[in-house]
């Protein structure tokens, strides 16, 4: 996983990748709108208002969706993306391959 700024440059990177399973698809969108935005196939964009919601939802994930990546994702949420838009793009993949594997 990585945080990218407006220019697409990586501002921060996690070592662990999410262990994508069918459990992610089973998450209730009403209870977990932020984690459901994460995908192993591309970027998930979180603006300044959305980003503070993600760590709280990560803390409530079922064990089947957890792992080392949750702690690292929480840390990435604390790092503001560079650029005037201040939108963090948390990327779970890079060029079609999962990071941290």
Image: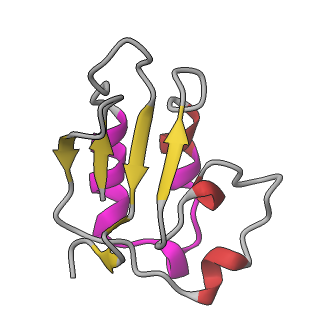
On the image, which quarter does residue 89 sit in? top left
Q: Position of residue 76 (x, y in %)?
A: 30, 42
Q: Residue at x 36, y 72 (%)?
A: 67
- Residue 64 colored in magenta in the image: yes
In the image, which residues are magenta? 57-77
Kindly give the residue lying farthest to the right in the view shown.
30
Q: How many marks?
A: 0
57 vs 48, nearest the viewer: 48
Q: Residue at x 28, y 68 (%)?
A: 68
On the image, which quarter does residue 7 sit in? top left
Q: Residue at x 31, y 32 (%)?
A: 5
Q: Is residue 87 left or right of residue 57?
A: left
Q: Position of residue 56 (x, y in %)?
A: 54, 42
Q: Position of residue 10 (x, y in %)?
A: 20, 43
Q: Is residue 99 left or right of residue 57?
A: left
- Residue 86 colored in magenta in the image: no
Kindly give the residue lying farthest to the top in the view shown.
84
Q: Quadrant of the C terminus?
A: bottom left
Query: Against 25, is 73 above or below?
Result: above
Q: Is residue 75 left or right of residue 11?
A: right
Query: Against 23, is 48 above or below?
Result: above
Q: Quadrant of the N terminus?
A: bottom left
43 vs 65, nearest the viewer: 43
Rendered image coloring scheme = secondary structure
Q: Position of residue 66 (x, y in %)?
A: 44, 71
57 vs 83, nearest the viewer: 83
Query: Against 30, is 10 above or below?
Result: above
């Amino acid at each position: 996983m990585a945080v990218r700024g407006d220019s697409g440059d990586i501002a921060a990177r996690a070592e662990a990748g999410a262990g994508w399973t069918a459990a992610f698809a089973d998450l209730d969108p009403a209870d977990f709108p932020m984690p459901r935005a994460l995908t192993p196939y591309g970027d998930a964009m979180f603006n300044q208002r959305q980003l503070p919601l993600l760590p709280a939802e990560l803390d409530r994930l079922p064990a089947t969706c957890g792992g080392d990546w949750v702690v690292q994702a929480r840390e990435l949420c604390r790092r503001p993306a560079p650029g005037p838009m201040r939108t963090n793009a948390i990327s779970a993949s890079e060029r079609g391959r999962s990071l941290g594997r």
